[in-house]
Image: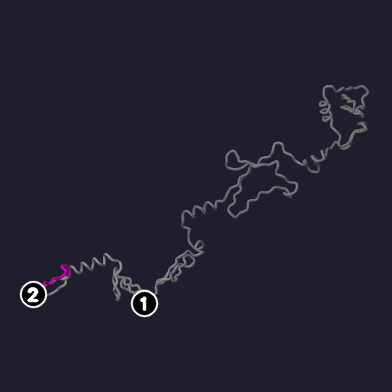
């Protein structure tokens, strides 16, 4: 019998041909190139190669040989010992092993960056600087005082001590009507432990604790003013008139009949029971 033997390729890359001298197999170059390009385009990992894969793209060369990872070819020229450098006083760069075959590069701001960086041309910083340089104006009744940051503003009075004999009970501070400041206000009915009115060597002291007025000029009595009158606390004519009016409508007065004294005025007898009015 007869047996038929068929010689055939894969119909794509390998082709077969039977001639007078026998069977030939050949490679379809176009189909092979297409298959290789598709393989490279669709896969990111190429395995099974022990030699370098060079010129992958744009002149880069990558090798997996020991000790060659520090060599990088850029544009056809090999660069070795690549250095990562910062800027003194501004940017710090450190290179350390990251636990794998490569290295870890850390870029950080230098602690003195704020002192060394030039921000003189920054408009926002310039605006802030101008505002701060202008300072603050503190206005009073007779003008204003300007103080910038770092300068001292003095608020002082004439007291020798602010811890003894001083109090703010009669004073207050309130927002003014314009809303642009504060007013210093004082109570319309102030209370003081004592008050001294002084002009040159003359002074009058009102003491709330003792209930006395010291420094009056009329501290002596004329002759014939009553045995029980107290020196140093003599009353004036006006004070006695006020006392007489306050005595009430039912008081009894004796006018000109054997008065206690002869000087014009209002006189009180020694028993404090008779009030004489001596006309001038």
Percent position of residue 239, x then y: 82, 30
Residue name at image x 84 percent, y 32 percent: 236
Against 165, residue 69 (above or below) is below
Numbered disc 2: secondary structure: strand
Q: Nearer the viewer, residue 120 or 244?
A: 244
Determine the CA span between mark 1 and mark 2: 52 Å
Circle 1: element type: loop
Q: Nearer the viewer, mark 1 or mark 2?
A: 2
* Colouring scheme, one of rainbow, by chain, secondary structure, one colour: one colour
| Residue identifier under label 1 | 66
Predominant SS of the magenta segment: loop
Q: How many marks?
A: 2
Instruction: Compare residues 20 and 199 and report the one nearer the observer.
Output: 20
Do the CB atoms of the residues marked 1 and 2 lie less than 8 Å apart? no
Magenta segment boundaries in residue numbering: 2-13
Q: Where, quadrant-wise, is the C terminus in this rendering?
A: top right
- Residue 122 to residue 93: above or below: above
Q: Is residue 48 above or below residue 146?
A: below
For residue 8: magenta? yes
Q: Which mark is residue 19?
A: 2
The local crowd at label 1, few if under 14, some if 14 to 19, many if 20 or more residues have their Cα within 10 Å, is few
Label 2 crowding class (10 Å Cα cut-off): few <14, some 14-19, many 20+?
A: few
Closer to the chain start, of discs 1 and 2, is 2
Query: Relative to residue 50, is residue 231 drawn left or right?
Result: right
Q: Is residue 66 left or right of residue 15?
A: right
Measured as percent of width and height from the top left, residue 260 is found at 92, 27
Query: In the image, residue 269 lies at what x, y percent?
Result: 91, 28
Q: Is residue 172 left or right of residue 59?
A: right
């Amino acid at each position: 019998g007869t047996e038929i033997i068929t010689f055939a390729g894969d119909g794509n890359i390998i082709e077969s041909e039977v001639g007078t001298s026998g069977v030939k197999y050949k490679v379809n170059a176009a189909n092979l190139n297409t298959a290789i390009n598709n393989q490279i385009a669709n896969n990111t990992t190429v395995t099974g190669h022990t030699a370098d894969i060079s010129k992958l793209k744009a002149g880069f060369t990558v090798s997996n040989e020991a000790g060659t990872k520090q060599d990088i070819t850029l544009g056809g020229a090999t660069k070795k010992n690549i250095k990562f450098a910062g800027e003194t006083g501004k940017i710090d760069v450190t290179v350390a092993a990251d636990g794998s075959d490569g290295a870890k590069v850390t870029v950080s701001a230098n602690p003195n960056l704020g002192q060394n960086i030039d921000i003189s041309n920054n408009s926002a910083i310039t605006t802030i600087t101008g505002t701060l340089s202008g300072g603050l104006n503190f206005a009073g009744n007779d003008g204003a005082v300007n103080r910038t940051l770092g300068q001292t503003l003095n608020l002082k009075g004439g007291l020798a001590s602010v811890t003894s004999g001083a109090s703010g009970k009669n004073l207050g501070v309130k927002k003014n009507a314009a809303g642009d400041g504060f007013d210093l206000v004082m109570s319309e009915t102030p209370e003081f432990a004592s008050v001294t009115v002084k002009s040159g060597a003359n002074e009058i002291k009102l003491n709330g604790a003792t209930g006395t007025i010291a420094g009056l000029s009329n501290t002596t009595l004329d002759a014939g003013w009553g045995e029980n009158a107290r020196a140093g606390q003599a009353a004036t004519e006006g004070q006695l008139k006020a006392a007489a009016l306050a005595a009430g409508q039912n008081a009894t007065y004796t006018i000109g009949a054997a008065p206690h004294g002869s000087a014009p005025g209002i006189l009180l007898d020694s028993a404090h029971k008779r009030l004489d009015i001596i006309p001038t």
